[in-house]
Image (spheres, grey):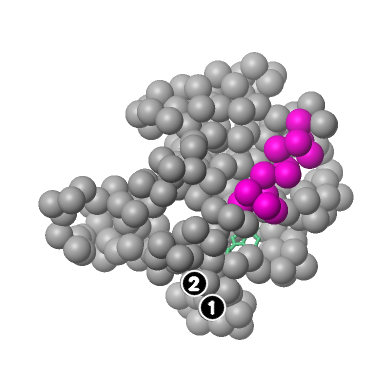
Amino acid sequence: MIHGVRLVILGRQGAGKGTQCVRLSNHYVVPHISTGDMLRAAVKEGTPLGRVAGEIMNSGGLLSDEIMVGIVRERLDQPDASGRGFILDGFPRTVGQAEALGAILEQPLDLVIDLDVPRELVLERISSRRVCRDCGANYSATKNDPVSRICDRCGGDVVQRDDDTPDAVNKRLDIYDSQTSPLISFYNAQGILAVVNGVGHPDHVLDRLVVAIAAAGRS
Ligand code: AMP
């Protein structure tokens, strides 16, 4: 039997968190909770949250800790996350959010993983990143690919994300360095941090992640 897990995945935009979290979610049978996906769904549905979020996201900025903590608290209360566990992707992103998460959780996190990919490499990856507008599947465009294509999984439109423009990407990477990377020492001080090399074939990265999680006492 595979045990559930309670994980946070940190890493720069373009480090492969989305791809790996989907795989880990299937492996450990726990929900993948991506705050970016939740916000993009709200933007698409035109909810009041979506109207606030759209502009901030397109500029590469962050939503307030107060809004984000409220969204995540509600999501973690759902039965699927309060049972076997969860994989948090994109949250926490500031020390304030991490402190709030600690106060929300009834059981501690098993592990926080820093999926490590250098800035130069993620810039390259993001410029070729494409995503399905409907189901969120990730693709990587090569130079010869047509500008738009159809999703293999659901038949939706595969496009470049609105916030993957060079200006917004650089702003997001700067914010990651100033606001999110302090979480690496925050969780290291709690003894629950593992750094995993995110460079290489996605299958190999997944193997490394599973080994790190097993070493932390979960399998
Ligand atoms: P992501 O898909 O994780 O790169 O998130 C896309 C965008 O959603 C970010 O650039 C932020 O504008 C917003 N966002 C997602 N998660 C958070 C968070 N935890 N705190 C603040 N803003 C967030």
Secondary structure of the residue carrying tag 1 is helix
Tell me, yes or no, if residue 134 can be seen here: no
Tell me, yes or no, if residue 150 can be seen here: yes
Quadrant in which residue 181 is drawn: top right
**Most common secondary structure along the magenta stretch:** helix
Do labels 1 and 2 touch, CB within 8 Å? yes
Q: Which residue is mark 1?
A: 55
Seen in the picture, residue 153 relative to 9 is either above or below; the reply is below
Disc number for residue 58:
2
Q: Which residues are magenta?
A: 176-188
Seen in the picture, residue 70 relative to 187 is either above or below; the reply is below
Which residue is rendered at x = 49% and y = 37% of the image?
Answer: 118
Estimate the x, y position of residue 162 in percent, counting from the top left.
40, 69
Secondary structure of the residue carrying tag 2 is helix
Disc number for residue 180:
none
Seen in the picture, residue 49 relative to 124 is either above or below; the reply is below
Which residue is rendered at x = 49% and y = 36% of the image?
Answer: 117
**Residue 59 is covered by the magenta coloring:** no
Q: Quadrant of ligand 1?
A: bottom right
